[in-house]
Image (cartoon, rainbow, N blue to C red):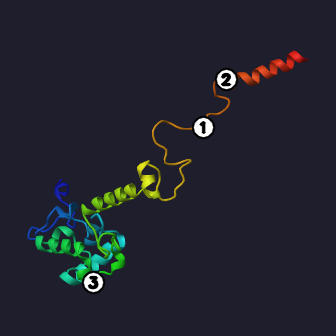
Amino acid sequence: MAKDNIQNPKSVPKESDDFRGIVHILGTDVKGNVKLSNALRQVKGVGYNLSKTFANVISKEMKIEKDVQIGRLSEEQVEKIEEMIKNPSKYGIPSYLFNRRKDLETGRDTHVAGPDVAFATRSDVERHKTLYTWRGYRHAYGQKVRGQGTRTSGRKGLTMGVIKSKTAPGAAAKPAESKQQAQAKK
């Protein structure tokens, strides 16, 4: 009976530790027991390769382990991580890992993260629509944009399919008439 009350010692933080169950990073709520690199991957604008690079830079800059749980970090450390994600060039992240290279408005390599990612993509789509480029045309009419086929996939709305000649109305009567006509001719 005493075994029912015992919890896994790895999953339960020590009483002296300052453990947070949920950590808020750039508009994303991340569970506190997730490792640093995996937690960064959940933030919009930070992909797989960039999360590994950020984890390396953060571990060097803040002198913490790469596989530390995000819930064990203090509020100041989380704010520093947000600053690193917002301005990665300041911390030595190479520009080829940024998600907005040669931005049309500024001409510089920038990195967009958090809720700004959705705004940036929406404004790019609207720009294509107003310029009436091919991509804008495809976006405006709800078609696939990047060259995918549309004959079999991407169908929306009413059920679409092929009508077989045996089940089509009137199609079954035509072969029967031709058989009757053939017998009448004999």
What's the distance in space between the residues labelled 1 and 2, CA to CA?
Answer: 16 Å
Amino acid beneath label 1: Val
Amino acid beneath label 3: Gly
- Disc 1 secondary structure class: loop
Q: Quadrant of residue 5?
A: bottom left
- In this view, the residue in front, 15 or 83, is 83
The spot of residue 35 in percent (x, y) is 26, 70
The numbered dot on residue 144 is: none
Amino acid beneath label 2: Gly
Q: Quadrant of residue 181?
A: top right
The spot of residue 153 in percent (x, y) is 52, 48
Task: Kindly indicate whether the residue at mark 2 contacts the one at mark 3 (C-beta within 8 angstroms).
Answer: no
Name the quadrant of the C terminus.
Answer: top right
What's the distance in space between the residues labelled 3 and 1, CA to CA?
Answer: 57 Å
Picture residue at 28% right of the left edge, 59% below the top:
119
The numbered dot on residue 92 is: 3
- In this view, the residue in front, 56 or 107, is 107
Q: Residues within 10 Å of mark 3 (few under 14, many from 20)?
A: few
The spot of residue 167 in percent (x, y) is 64, 28
Picture residue at 19% right of the left edge, 71% below the top:
82
Sequence-wise, which precedes: disc 3 or disc 2? 3
Q: Which residue is mark 1?
A: 162
Q: Which residue is mark 2?
A: 170
Q: Quadrant of residue 130?
A: bottom left
- In this view, the residue in front, 166 or 17, is 166
Sequence-wise, which precedes: disc 1 or disc 2? 1
